[in-house]
Image (cartoon, rainbow, N blue to C red):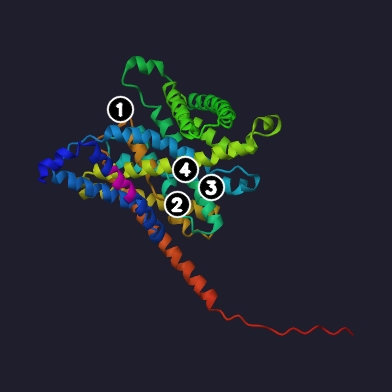
């Protein structure tokens, strides 16, 4: 079979199915490799994408437009990530202090990192406005729960809990900050600009968010009430379809649609809290738990598929010339330094001396790429290179890999020393009573 015939076959639906299936199978094995080596599967997926790109160039198929696929994957990916993160948040009274600490570190770390990164970007890329700098800096400041949560399963319980809460809050807050900044972009169409005048104000954003939360709670109660009574086994994807519908309608109405997903996830994950008092009679606990476990499984599986194809396609679209630019390398190095300096100060002040490996567990990943591709055309700048994005994703992932491997070695040494200590016995005599 010659190269021309092979290139023609790439348009065949069977070839596309074969390619998609192979990518998913490889992604599963990358996940297993990640568990055993602490190397994030994200890096392996990007490398796979780069290799696919080289193969496409070799057979002359390098003009494929992947952006429409990325756009759809981006929307579904955001919804699934926020929903998955919300399902992980248990609002128990015993968790108030850990949740508050994680929230504080996530929020302050996000805003401080975005602020300093925006200053760096505006200094080295003068064509960026202050607003554009913030819009580009925000995705670079968001932790990746999609990478962190599977990577910290072997850590001590309190450290694992901290990372789950912190990365979840970072995802949700980062997305909120990003879309708030995007709402401040003047519309290109004068009529549209007049229609949304003041849409980027903090007060307007707060009122819109409040309205969205109220509507989200109402929708959540209705959805739980209805779906716990549906007997069909196909109801989970029906539920996902309803959430996608609500998200899209919320987007068209200029609400904060991710709040709908967030609030729904919180209600499902904490049903006993939200269905207390008079509302308790409306909850069928067993049926609702079935919905929760099924939804959790669906979001995990969907997030796996979205993450796989998104990072592979991201690897395919990488322009290698951007990686050889010394300006790009310098900006990326400064941004990486900012991430860990700010993180060190925050964790050292709030948590104390026991800061390893938490200090170095700060990877950027799927949310960073998703939001980068969600930047509206009117806010984009040719001065910002995708190489910065790639360097920071790879850099933070490699640092986390090193930290986790080091932590495993230290834990192994500690266990080895404990096992090496001799176990003796002591004779005990009952004291005499005078």
Q: Marks 4/1: CA distance?
A: 26 Å
Which label was assigned to residue 378?
1
Determine the image quadrant of residue 219: top right
Q: Quick check: can you spot residue 272?
A: yes
State the residue position of label 3. 102
Q: Which residue is drawn at 39% across and 30% down?
A: 182
**Which of the marked residues, 4 or 1, is nearer the chain's N terminus?**
4
Of the pair 368 and 388, the residue shown nearer to us = 368
Check the image and report above or below for 146 versus 77. Answer: below
State the residue position of label 2. 150
Q: Residue at x 48, y 38 (%)?
A: 83
Q: Residue at x 51, y 71 (%)?
A: 415
Q: Is residue 357 left or right of residue 221?
A: left
Q: Marks 3/2: CA distance?
A: 18 Å
Judged by its main secondary structure, the magenta piece is helix
**Which of the marked residues, 2 or 1, is nearer the chain's N terminus?**
2
Nearer the observer, disc 2 or disc 1?
Answer: 2
Indicate the position of residue 260 as horizontal and vertical percent values. 50, 30
Q: What element carries label 3?
A: helix
Q: Give the range drawn in magenta.
A: 19-25
Q: In this view, does 222 lie to the left or right of 331?
A: right
State the residue position of label 4. 170
At label 4, counting other C-alpha atoms closer than 10 Å, the crowd grade (few under 14, some 14-19, many 20 or more) is many
């Amino acid at each position: 079979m010659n190269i021309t015939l092979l290139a023609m076959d790439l348009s065949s639906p069977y070839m596309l199915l074969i390619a998609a299936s192979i990518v998913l199978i490889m992604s599963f094995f990358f996940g297993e490799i990640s568990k055993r080596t602490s190397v994030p599967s994200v890096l392996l997926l990007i490398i796979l994408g780069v290799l696919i790109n080289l193969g496409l160039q070799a057979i002359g198929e390098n003009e494929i437009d992947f952006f429409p696929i990325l756009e759809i994957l981006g929307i579904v990916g955001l919804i699934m990530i926020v929903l998955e993160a919300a399902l992980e948040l248990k609002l128990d009274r015993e968790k108030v202090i850990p949740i508050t600490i994680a929230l504080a570190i996530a929020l302050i770390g996000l805003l401080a990192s975005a602020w300093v990164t925006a200053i760096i970007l505006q200094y080295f890329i003068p064509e960026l406005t202050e607003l554009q700098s913030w819009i580009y800096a925000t995705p670079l400041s968001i932790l990746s729960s999609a990478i962190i949560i599977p990577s910290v399963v072997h850590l001590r319980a309190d450290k694992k809990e901290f990372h789950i809460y912190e990365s979840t809050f970072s995802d949700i807050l980062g997305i909120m900050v990003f879309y708030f900044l995007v709402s401040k972009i003047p519309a290109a169409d004068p009529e549209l600009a007049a229609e949304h005048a003041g849409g980027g104000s903090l007060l307007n954003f707060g009122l819109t968010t409040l309205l969205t939360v109220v509507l989200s709670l109402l929708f959540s109660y209705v959805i739980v009430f209805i779906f716990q009574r549906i007997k069909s086994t196909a109801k989970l994807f029906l539920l996902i379809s309803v959430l996608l519908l609500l998200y899209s309608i919320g987007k068209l109405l200029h609400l904060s649609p991710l709040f709908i997903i967030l609030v729904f996830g919180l209600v499902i994950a904490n049903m006993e809290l939200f269905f207390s008092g008079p509302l308790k009679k409306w909850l069928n606990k067993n049926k609702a738990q079935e919905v929760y476990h099924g939804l959790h499984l669906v979001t995990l599986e969907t997030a796996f598929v979205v993450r796989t194809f998104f990072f592979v396609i991201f690897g395919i679209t990488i322009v290698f010339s951007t990686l050889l630019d010394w300006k790009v390398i310098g900006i990326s190095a400064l941004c990486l330094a900012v991430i860990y300096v700010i993180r060190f100060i925050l964790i050292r002040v709030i948590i104390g001396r026991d800061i390893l490996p938490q200090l170095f567990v700060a990877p950027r990943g799927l949310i960073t790429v998703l939001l980068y591709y969600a930047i509206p055309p009117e806010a984009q700048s040719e001065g910002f290179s995708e190489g910065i994005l790639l360097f920071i994703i790879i850099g933070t992932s490699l640092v986390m890999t090193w930290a986790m491997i080091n932590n495993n070695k230290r834990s192994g040494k500690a266990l080895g020393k404990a096992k090496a200590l001799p176990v003796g016995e002591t004779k005990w005599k009952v004291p005499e009573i005078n």
